[in-house]
Amino acid sequence: MSTIKIRSKRFADHTLVRTLIAHPMETGHNKNNTTGELIPAHFIQTLTFKHNGKVLSQCQMGYGVSKNPFFSFKIKSAKAGDKVSISWQDNLAYSDTQEHIIS
Amino acid sequence: MLTTRRRFVKKLLALSSYALSLGFSHISLANWLASNFSRQTISQSIAQLFPNQTLQTSDRISLKLPNTAENGSVVPITISSTIPDVDTIYILSEKNPVPLIAQFSIDPDLETYLGARFKMQETCDVIVVLKAKDQYFQVRQKVKVTLGGCGG
């Protein structure tokens, strides 16, 4: 199952796109409660938001972003059937991409 | 033995897919700069991100931020602005170990609008900086944090 959920809603003058990513966003400073060992840092570093293949936003982030990150964007003009996609990469080189069709 | 081999294969797969994606997509445009996200103070961070720039305080940026965040590990923020030609949005938290939380490039096809959730270590100012045509605009808002979100 994809780690990315995308929802969109069209309004008269814009389209709101919301995304929720399942990711631990570990800082590297937290300790495991049972073993007392540090949990290694594991966080998303870059996120790309595309609309019909065109990159609309690129994000660089550190571990200051919350666990299971949420983002929302507003596209100025989007039609029903347009394709948006979100992809991320983290510091351990995992990545995921999800496409969504605006209804 | 088995676990290490398993781990090795997993990492190999992850790394090779990363290399492939770097080669064949536009993701490589977003180079992640470790220096921007290192542990430093807010003044060092601002000096590094905006060298020799003056950050003008602007009332044309509106922030939707809670005055009090009960849980510092999830602080919702919504940024919108009427400043034209904004191309980058920066979110900084003054007293976080890593002050820069995230930076977003904004295409002209996007409205100057952004929603996100971030962590705050303690009560401090949240600084949002917008870059528009080589000019920098900032707005600050204090958020009271009752339970820090970076350590726990």
Image: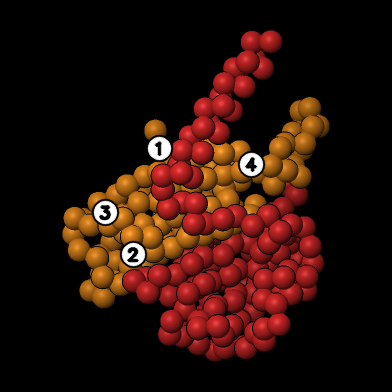
Chain colours: A orange, B red
Q: Secondary structure at mark 3?
A: strand
Name the foreground residue: A5 vs B135: B135
- Residue A40 screen position, x and y as percent: 71, 37
Q: Please rate how many residues cluster around mark 3, counting C-alpha atoms within 10 Å: few if below 14, some from 14 to 19, many from 20.
A: some
Q: Quadrant of residue B121?
A: bottom right
Q: Earlier in the sequence, mark 3 or mark 4?
A: 4
Q: Please rate how many residues cluster around mark 1, counting C-alpha atoms within 10 Å: few if below 14, some from 14 to 19, many from 20.
A: few
- Residue A31 screen position, x and y as percent: 77, 38
Q: Earlier in the sequence, mark 1 or mark 4?
A: 1
Quarter of the image that includes the N terminus of chain B: top right
What type is the residue that disc 2 sits on? Leu
Do badges 2 and 4 share one subunit?
yes
Q: Chain of mark 4?
A: A
What type is the residue that disc 1 sits on? Ser
Q: Secondary structure at mark 2?
A: strand
Question: Horizontal placement of B67 versus B151: left or right?
Answer: left
- Residue B114 screen position, x and y as percent: 46, 68
Do badges 3 and 2 share one subunit?
yes
Residue matched to label 3:
A83
Compared with B93, B27 (above or below) is above
Q: Secondary structure at mark 4?
A: loop
Question: Horizontal placement of B94 versus A3: left or right?
Answer: right
Q: Is residue A8 visible?
A: no
Q: Chain of mark 2?
A: A
- Residue A4 screen position, x and y as percent: 42, 44
Residue A2's tag is 1
What type is the residue that disc 4 sits on? His
Q: Are marks 2 and 1 in contact (CB under 8 Å)?
A: no
Compared with B126, B60 (above or below) is below
